Amino acid sequence: MKKILSVLLILLLFCSCGAEIKNPEEENISSGDAVLSEEEEGQKEILPLEGDCITLEDSEGLLWAKAMEFGKTIVFVNDDGTINAYNAESGEKLYTALASTGEENIFRIEKYEEKDGFDYRILLGNGVLYRNSAEPEKEFFTALPGGTVFSKGMFGNDDQSCYDINEKAFVYACEDGIMLVDVNGNNAKLVLDNKILENFKEIMTNCEYDVSALAPFEFRSPRFILGGTKIAATVVTWENIDNGFVVYDIESESIDIGRWIPEPWSPYYTVCDRYVVECGSWVYTGIYDAEAKTFTQYKEGFNSGFSYNYATYDFQNVIVVDYDNGNDDPMDYTMMRAYLCTAKNLDDRSRPFISVTDDTTECWVEAIGEKYAVIVLGGKEDKWIPKAVCAVKYSE
């Protein structure tokens, strides 16, 4: 009798503490596992993919968004200021937020860790909005020095944007060329004068042709590079067509390199705060290393901006995509096969990355970060309405 009373007393104490008596079979289910009903299991769609892909939940609206990687978190920012963050390893949607961009033009969205407490920023026509990927409500706005305001189209070329700014200086395009100013608005100096481009071949030393019919040339789209010690800028023709780039050294007040681009394709910069990429259509890719002051040309154009056949974060390691559908249509993205390669060996097929297992699903690499790539599976009826957006780890 005493034993029975003891057992009853223990049970009463256990229940009074809020403890739950579980079915022993339930103990084998970990707290992180989702328990689905038979109906829910039947509704889960098995994606036609081979590879370690994680489907991002509630991924509507991610197409065309700027993607940035912060550890295991991928943050997508749309042109309207809508922000969606995901855990790249689980696919869980962490939050949705709206940046306070107002009606201002968004020129550029980029990672930026020089401002204490923030890790990315949105460059607007009238200032910069700093944000934190881990704290969606945290943001800080600062106006451009001197109340400067830009609008898209004012210089005809907005691919790189009209200005750049760091914690010390502000550089921007104007009618006369490229201006450099202290971040407090003092000590303004015209560092790249459009007039020097009258001697085009002296600046763009690889140009062997008479390009006088394209004159006058102008400097546009300045960006700080190599820790703010240099400025990269695009050179455009009188028709606002990109025709080359320069890298200017602030301390020596001289141009390190001037490159004419034979075909009117925009140079891409800055990559890893170090490289300027020259893309001659699909024909070749040239990479200028601002630190080593060297230029390397590769036989094939692998800028992911030209097609979905290449994706690269650092222009050293490249995801190469083949579409084995026997179709010459460049817009047919079925039968995708992706491989991990290096810039020096784009023909390497020894490291398969991911592949589509049916012949109707269209698939491509939408964005790429330091360790993760974002894969889109297009719908059968309309490829631009994704049926799935996935994250896949390609690098340690």
Image (cartoon, helix red, strand yellow):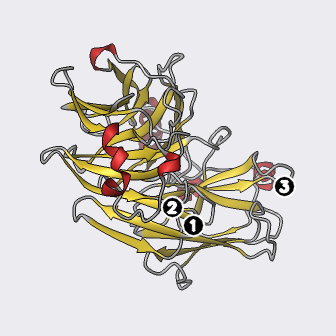
Res 363 seen here: yes
**Marks 2 and 1, Cα distance to the nearest angstrom?**
41 Å
Please provide percent x and percent y for residue 84.
54, 36
Q: Is residue 298 above or below residue 331?
A: below
Secondary structure at numbered mark 1: loop
**Disc assigned to residue 52:** 1
Amino acid type at mark 2: Pro
| Image coordinates for residue 191, horizontal then vertical, percent | 24, 37
Asked if residue 366 lies left or right of residue 48, the reply is left
Name the residue at 87% across, 51% down.
381
How packed mark 3 is, by other alpha carbons closer than 10 Å (few <14, some 14-19, many 20 or more), is: few
**Circle 1 residues within 10 Å: few <14, some 14–19, many ≥20:** few
Residue at 43%, 53% (x, y): give it: 244
For mark 2, does the 10 Å Cα neighbourhood hold few (<14), some (14 to 19), or many (20 or more) residues? Answer: some
Determine which residue is flagged by label 2: 262
Residue 12: percent from the left, percent from the top?
Answer: 46, 34
Q: Element under label 2?
A: loop
Say the numbered circle drawn on residue 180: none
Give yes or no for contact between labels 2 and 1 (Cβ–Cβ under 8 Å).
no
> Depth check: 156 or 373 in front?
156
**Residue tagged 3:** 380
Q: Amino acid at mark 3?
A: Lys
Q: Residue at x 70, y 61 (%)?
A: 363
Q: Give how far apart the Cα atoms at labels 3 and 2 are.
A: 39 Å
Residue 76 position in % (x across, y down):
52, 40
What amino acid type is highlighted by mark number 1?
Answer: Asp
- Whether 335 is drawn above or below 133: the answer is below
Marked residue nearer the N-terminal end (3 or 2) = 2
